[in-house]
Image (cartoon, rainbow, N blue to C red):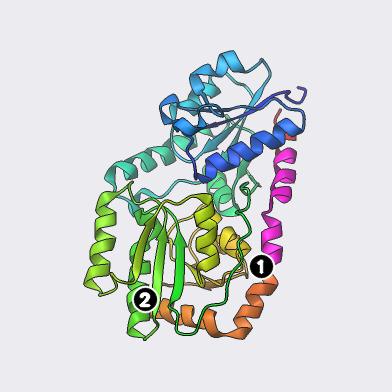
Amino acid sequence: MSAPAGVHQVAAGAAPRDAITHHMLEARDVLRAHGLRSEIFVEGEHIHPTLVGDVHPVTHWDRVTAPGDAAILHYSIASPAFFHVLDRCARCAIHYHNITPAELLWRYAPNIALECAIGRRRLAELAGRVSPVGADSAYNAHELEELGFGPGTVLGIMRQPLAPTPRLPRADGERVKLLFVGRGVPNKAQHHLVMASAALADAGVDHELWLVGAWTAVPPYTDHCRALADALGVADRVRFIGSVTEQELAQRYADADLFLCLSDHEGFCVPLLEAMAAGLPIVAYASSAIPETLGQAGLLLDEKTPSLVAEAVVEALTNPLLTARFDAARAAQLERFDHDAVTGRLLAFVEEIR
C-alpha cells in the first residue's frame, strides 16, 4: 500500500494550554509543510470555542477526509472519537500520552477516576488494530507493550517554546520563589508541595510556593490543599496562582528560583522542559516518566518525605557542584526533545503507516 496523502489526528478533546492540543496543532503544521493533508478531529462537545477554526468534530470525518487517508489516535482517555475513526479508517496509528492510574484519584475525584479506569481498560481493545505504535516517552511505550501492542516508538511531544524572558538576580533578603506548573489534581500531588513548604519554613527558609495551573477540575482536592496550608501555617507562603497566559507563564519561570515537582504520575511532563529552558534548578520526585524527561538536568528524589525535599531544595539552590551538573546536562536534554528532534521522529513514524 502506498504512503497516505492525508494524515489526520484524533483526540478526545481540544483546549488551550493543553499539552496534547499544542502537540496536535504543531504536528498538523509539520505534516502540511511536508505536503500531506492534515486535520484534527475530536468529540464535538469537547472543542473549546477558541479552537473551532482549527479542530473538526469527529462526525465530520467522512466529509473532510479522502479514501486511503491515515489517522494518528492521540490516546489519553477513552473516547467514542477513536472508535468512530477506527470504523472508517483502515490505516490508524496510536500516539499514547498515558492515563492517570485510577487509584490516585478515587478519594477526591471519583468521576475522573472512573473515566481513567475505563480508559485503561478500553486501551487494550486497540491492540492489533493500530500500527505503528508511538508514545511520548519510553515509560508510556512500555505500558503499551505490556498490553500487547508490541514495541513502540518514543516520539516526545511538540510545543512551541515560551517567549525568552530574562531572569534577574534575586535581591538580598528576598524570599526564595519555588514554582510548580500543573492542574490542581491529586496525581500532581500539590499537597506534598504544601507539606514541603512547611518543612522549609520550619528549617528557616523564607520562601513562597507558586502553584500555577487551573484549580477548577477537582474542588474537594483544592479545598484539601488550602486547608492543609492553613493547618501547617504556610497559607501566607503558598500561592494558588491558577491558569495563566503564555506570557504570564514565561514570566513566572523567569521570576522563580527553583522548579519543584513531586507529582505521582506523569506520562511526560512538559513543564520540566520549560523549567530547563528557563535555566531553573529542578528538584523532582522520580515517579513515572519524570526521570526520563529530566535526565541529569535536575535532582531526582526516590522518596518525598517533607524534610528530605526541604533539604534537597536547599542543596539545589546553594551547591555549586549541583548547579554545574544541571547546567552541563540541560542543553543535551532540551535538544533531545526540541521541535526539530520530535519533527524528525514524527515524520519517520508517519512513513511507517501503511
Q: Secondary structure at mark 1?
A: helix
Residue denoted by label 2? 306
Q: In the picture shown, does residue 53 fall above or below 146?
A: above
Q: Which mark is residue 330?
A: 1
Front-most of 293 and 228? 228
Instruction: Please give the range of residues in magenta.
Output: 330-348
Identify the residue at horizontal 37%, vertical 61% (top origin).
189
Q: Is residue 74 visible?
A: yes
Instruction: Locate residue 203 relative to residue 163 in the image: left or right.
Output: left
Q: Which mark is residue 29?
A: none
Give the x, y percent position of residue 25: 60, 37
- Give the image quarter of residue 186: bottom left
Magenta-colored stretch includes residue 333? yes
Magenta-colored stretch includes residue 124? no
Q: Is residue 269 visible?
A: no
Identify the residue at horizontal 51%, vertical 56% (top origin).
249
Q: In the picture shown, does residue 314 fall above or below 22?
A: below
Amino acid beneath label 1: Arg
